[in-house]
Amino acid sequence: MILQSVVDLVAICAKKGIQNAILSPGSRCAPLTLAFARHPRIHTRTISDERSAAFIALGMAQQMEEPVVLICTSGSAALNYYPAVAEAFFQQIPLLILTADRPAEWIDQYDGQTIFQQEVYGKHVKKSFQLPDSDTFSDQSWHSSRIVNEAINLATQFPAGPVHINIPLREPFYPEKGEAFDFPEKPKVFNLVKSKTLPTEESLIKLKSRLEVVQKILIVPGQQRPNTQIQGILDQLSKNQNAVIVTDTISNLQSDQTISSHDHWLGNPEISETLQPDLVISFGKSVISKSLKLFLRKTQASHWHILEDGNAKDTYQRLTRNIESEPLFFLNWLNENLGNQNSKYYQTWHSLEKTVSANLTQILQREAFGEYAALANCLGKTPLLSKIHVANSMPVRYLNLLGKRNQEVICNRGTSGIDGSNSTAVGCTFTTKEIVTLITGDMAFFYDRNAFWHNYTMPNLRVILLNNHAGGIFRLIDGPAKQPELEEFFETKQKLSAQHLATEFGFFYSKAVNHEELEASLIDFYSDSLHPKILEIETSSPKNAEILKEVKEKIKIVIQQQK
């Protein structure tokens, strides 16, 4: 007999709008598996590798901005969720994690597939719950329903994030032949009534008074989803020359009015000295650019951070005001209350932006074949109505160096690991018919190959694999680059080719080792297909490092000539 509380749990999920569940097969979780699989309003998929399953769920929830359910059996299965759980926590992505467990009396008794699962994710979930292990009494049923409601509400409450429910289950796990699941039509539900967070009139008066004495305002959006309303306000502030807007690629707020090539000059002390702001205003999550972070940490400017819940995020070590507000409201207020700013300051930033934008393409075209120019070429062919997933390490840094993007850019910058980038992109393909392009390096790609180990079609997935057969970023970091152990212990040399994986998982495959092969491969790379496609760009790690340094030096010379 299946616990009615498990059936009620699924009914509550459906009633509260959850539409998707990702499960990994197991016996202890069978009651959960069957209940989700049999509910008519929840789309349930099965992914065998729990680590991939969790990142796939994350990729779906990130796009839909609603919780996706994760279901696994007891024991180490739950631990394999951990990397994605941590990523979801720091990216503020809602997940509802359901882990089946042994009853409490069997924990730490040499019983099979058993670990300490209560609160296993520690501080990396918003909260952990333990479901009652029976529904013998009506209060236990009430308690179970209350927990599920609270967990789902909490997952979506700002800041969104993962919530864990551990569920002890006793045998029998499987219904008898002919036993139906009785999903209640009106399960016990209580919903969260959301409200906006806005600053008080008194606080706005004080902020306006402070604005009257600043002349050089720098606005720095962190990682976030595209937002046309915020984009419009930022563009207006820039057109009026009332603020300089510096946008990393993961801000998804880049436009012709924003600065997106800053990585090319902020590392130069002579130039950076002329760009010092009076006030930095930030919102959103992290930024990629290390040079931007170092520049802002060295500035003497005040820093205001806008965040709905008011939690302090002093990324640049200059925080003076933490403003509890929705960014959209505050930016509208800022646009209406700013007087004329220092136009020379604005023009200095935008002159640098124009110089880099006008010269970078030609400089790359004159370079030898390598990742940098090859990726620039690929991006020129990427459809505007598509999404770009990018892996950490060098791919996301190349993307940032290559300037303004019109597509939504998605990257696992919560923890900035290489694990799970394939799987996150796969999850995204499950939510859209648009092309999803994964730009990845060889280490991240092969590390997460089980992302493709499932039975679901992904005809809209395109993978651009930068395979230099090593962890090339370590040649660009002064510490490891100077060590004799660089090649053996940092670069992780490997001889793998994606061609074998493509054959195994049914991908169309092409490979480029020079400009001509790349051009030929790109002709039909984005054409409609019944199968996903991989374009493997094979290069040399030492050569890539050399090209990157040459391009930086040439950009530096061009900027000096424009002075």
Image: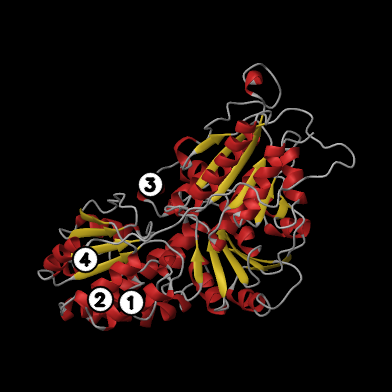
Q: Give the labeled residue for mark 4.
A: 272
Name which residue type carries label 4. Answer: Ser
Q: Give the labeled residue for mark 1.
A: 233
Residue 134 location (% of width, % of height)? 67, 29
The answer for how far apart the CA atoms under marks 4 and 3 are is: 27 Å
The answer for how far apart the CA atoms under marks 3 and 1 are is: 46 Å
Circles 4 and 2, Cβ within 8 Å, touching? The answer is no
Name which residue type carries label 3. Answer: Lys
Label located before the other in sequence (3 or 1)? 1
The answer for how far apart the CA atoms under marks 3 and 2 are is: 48 Å
Q: Give the labeled residue for mark 3.
A: 482
> Which residue is at 41% across, 61% downward?
223
Viewer-side residue, 500 vs 126: 126
Residue 36 location (% of width, % of height)? 72, 48
Q: Left or right of 182: which side holds 543?
A: left
Is residue 79 visible in the rendered structure shown here? no
Mark linked to residue 335: 2
Is residue 462 visible in the rendered structure shown here? yes
Label located before the other in sequence (4 or 2)? 4
The quarter of the displayed image where residue 272 is located: bottom left
